[in-house]
Image (cartoon, rainbow, N blue to C red):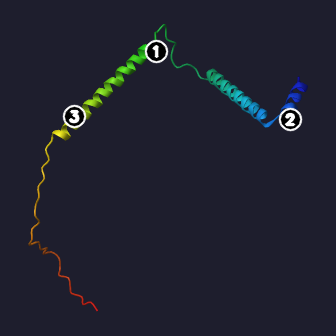
């Protein structure tokens, strides 16, 4: 058995780069799956269930779950549409008022001290 493995490894070492790369990817994936399976089985062995198993409770099927999801999405779309149309009606239905006001011409600020004149050379 060990002799067959060493022959396979030598044959793989002498094979082209593409073949070695395929074996590398395949064996890496298989070892990753093995590690995950061992980890899950270990967790299953050390973690105890927190509640008693349910007795014959029917979970809703795909169609029922999908139908409920469609109802929720349609309800939210209606709410969003109503909010949007209300905002548009408020914007379009409102009136704008513009007031033009001329500034006073006798604007004098009494609290500032006078600025001394500086001659320019």
The residue lying at 52 percent from left, 20 percent from top is 50
> Where is mark 3, residue-wise?
86
Horizontal side of residue 100 vs 14, given as left or right: left
Quadrant assignment, res 17? top right
SS under mark 3 = helix
Q: Are marks 1 and 2 in contact (CB under 8 Å)?
A: no
Horizontal side of residue 87 vs 16, given as left or right: left
Q: Is residue 33 above or below residue 55?
A: below
Total residue callouts? 3
> Where is mark 2, residue-wise?
14
Q: Which is closer to the viewer, label 3 or label 2?
A: 2
Q: Which sits in the foreground, 49 or 64?
A: 64
Q: Which sits in the foreground, 21 or 117?
A: 21
Instruction: State the mark number for residue 28.
Output: none
SS under mark 1 = helix
The image position of residue 2, as x and y in percent, is 89, 26
Q: Earlier in the sequence, mark 3 or mark 1?
A: 1
Instruction: State the mark number for residue 62.
Output: 1
Q: Earlier in the sequence, mark 3 or mark 2?
A: 2
The residue lying at 19 percent from left, 38 percent from top is 90
Q: Which is closer to the viewer, label 3 or label 1?
A: 3
Pointer 2 local density, CA inside 10 Å: few below 14, some 14–19, many at least 20: few
Pointer 1 local density, CA inside 10 Å: few below 14, some 14–19, many at least 20: few
Which quadrant of the figure contains the N terminus? top right
Q: Which is closer to the viewer, label 1 or label 2?
A: 2
Which quadrant of the figure contains the C terminus? bottom left
Q: CA distance from mark 3 to mark 2?
A: 74 Å
Q: Which sits in the foreground, 96 or 45?
A: 96
Q: Earlier in the sequence, mark 1 or mark 2?
A: 2
């Amino acid at each position: 058995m060990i002799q067959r493995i060493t022959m396979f490894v030598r044959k793989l070492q002498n094979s082209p780069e593409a073949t070695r790369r395929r074996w590398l990817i395949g064996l890496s994936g298989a070892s990753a799956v093995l590690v995950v399976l061992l980890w899950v089985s270990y967790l299953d062995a050390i973690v105890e269930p927190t509640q008693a198993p349910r007795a014959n409770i029917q979970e809703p099927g795909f169609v029922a779950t999908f139908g409920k999801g469609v109802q929720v999405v349609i309800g939210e779309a209606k709410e969003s549409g109503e909010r949007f149309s209300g905002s548009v009606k408020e914007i379009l239905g409102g009136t704008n008022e513009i007031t033009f006001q001329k500034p006073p011409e006798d604007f004098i600020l009494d609290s500032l001290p006078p600025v001394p004149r500086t001659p320019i050379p």
